[in-house]
Every structure is written in C-alpha cells, then in structure tokens.
Amino acid sequence: MESRTIGHHTVSAVGLGGMPLSIEGRPDRDRAIATVHAALDAGVTLIDTADAYHRDAGEVGHNEELVAEALRSWGGDPSAVLVATKGGHLRPGDGSWTKDGRPEHLKAAAKASAQRLGVDAIGLYQFHRPDPSVPYAESIGALVELLDEGVIQQAGISNADVAQIDEANEVLGGRLASVQNQFSPAFRSSLGELQHCAELGIAFLPWSPLGGIARASEVGTAHAAFGRVAESRGVSPQQVTLAWELALAPVVVPIPGSSRPASIQDSVRAVDLDLTADELAELSAS
C-alpha cells in the first residue's frame, strides 16, 4: 500500500478510525476484532483510538483495550503498526462529551493509555480537543513533558484552528507531528488547516472523512459528483472520496471509521485510485 509519513513514522496512506467499534451502536467484540484484523491484513499500519472512545461511564479506554487485544491476536508484526491515541475528552456515560485540558489530567491520561495499550511509549499522542477553561499553551505543555519523559514518542493535536496549530508547534519546539480535524465532502471548513499543514509538512488526519458514521453510506447521493465519478470508474463513492482527500496534499492520511471488515477493505482500495485532474476539479467544486 502507498505510504505517507507522520513525523518520523511511515504509515499506510489510509488508516483505521476505531471509534465506531466502541461507542453507541458498536458491534460485538468478535466482529470488532475481525474489523481491525481485516484492516491490518489489507496493509493498514495506522490505527486511531482515544481513551474517550467508549459508551458507558465505567469503561474508559474501551477502544484502546480492544485495539491492543486485536494487535496481540493478529498473525502479523504489531511493531509495524502506529497506534495513535488521544486524551482531553471525557464521556460521562450519558452520551455527552466533556473536556479536560488540564496538564495534570493529560499526563495521567497518557500514562493510563500507555498501560492499556501495553506499550512503553505511545507512538502518537494527541490532545483531543481544546478546553476553553485551560490556556492552550498549558495543555500543549503537558505534551512537551510527556515527550521529554519518554511516555510518548510523538505529539499531535485535534480539532485545532490555524492559530492553534502554530501555537502548538511553537510550544513543542517544532515537534508537532499531526493535526486531526474533521474533513469530508460535507465538512470542508478545515481546508485552511489542511493546507497550512501541507505548507509546514505536518500530517493532517481527516476524521469522519466520509461524513460520519451515520452518513458514510450516503456520500455518493448526498454529493452527486462523487457518485458520478464512482459510477464512471466502477468503484464505490467511498473510495472516490478518500482518493480525492489523498490527492489534496501528500500530508493527508484519512482515518475512516469502520465497524465491518468489508467497509475498511473497500476504503483501503482508494490508495490505488488515481483520479484525473478533471475529476479532482469536479469533486473540489461540488
């Protein structure tokens, strides 16, 4: 599979987003593990998770534990896989999402994530979402300490604007490895952040790259141009969507979420789909 870089790691051009495997509507454990194994067998070497990817209040880190279990039971080499996790979001168990960007919370959360993942150092740790009650530089300062202490190998941020990208990179002394923002045909307002990352050489990881769990199946009908190109090429609209995102910049690494093996197997085929200049222009203008 085509590869791209996140900091000093080389990863598959399409990753796997683990969230659908652990939140509301999640599959049973056997199918969840099978989905991760299908991704790995297809050449995926980036899995994105978070301590907040769980459903109930008493199961913090559910997805991290599931990913760790899937890697242990896989027949391949797990050391070739970059597991990226996040901290700074909380789920009380009532369906809501809250924030905690205090440095002491992030440092404790990262150490707990490393224990659940069964690693000495987390390959990529990302501040999940800015906390308005905590100065951004203080939250990022926790990542600096985690890097310097060897708890994490690389640091990233999520749900950040251009100013926050620059601030984080400055606080980290130029060591910002990734930015994970929402981006899809339905949500293009983070194109500026994507382009900024491309200028800086920082990996940009679109989350919900197909429009979200509930709408991924409708991307070809909700966005007609993607459906037209898919039909003319004889591929799925999801492949066209991911191929379009990959073509936007060499730093883009989409992380589509999947809850079935067939979904991620279809998604990874996007790396082999070379869209023409006319097709890309049509998709970008739609």
Image (cartoon, grey):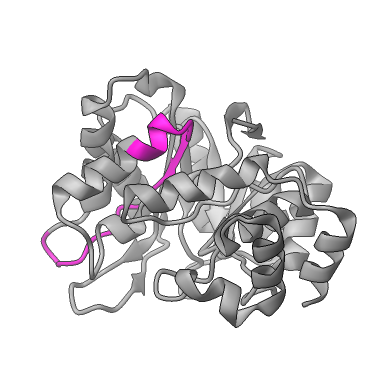
How far from the left and from the top, in percent, is residue 107?
Answer: 36, 46
How far from the left and from the top, in percent, is residue 80?
Answer: 45, 22
Residue 61 visible in image: no
Toward the left, the furthest residue is 58
Residue 165 image-quadrant placement? bottom right
At a point 71% along the width and 64% down the height, the residue shown is 229
Residue 51 visible in image: yes
Overall secondary structure of the magenta stretch? loop
At a point 64% along the width and 32% down the height, the residue shown is 2
Residue 146 image-quadrant placement? top left
How far from the left and from the top, in percent, is residue 182?
Answer: 57, 66
| Image height of 208 relative to 79, above or below | below
Taking the magenta stretch, the answer to whether it contains residue 245 is no
Quarter holding the C terminus is bottom right
Taking the magenta stretch, the answer to whether it contains residue 57 is yes
At a point 15% along the width and 49% down the height, the residue shown is 29
Query: Magenta residues, as a range?
Result: 38-58
Quarter holding the N terminus is top right
At a point 52% along the width and 57% down the height, the residue shown is 138
| Image height of 42 relative to 212, above or below | above
- In the image, taking residue 9 as reference, residue 47 lies left or right, namely left
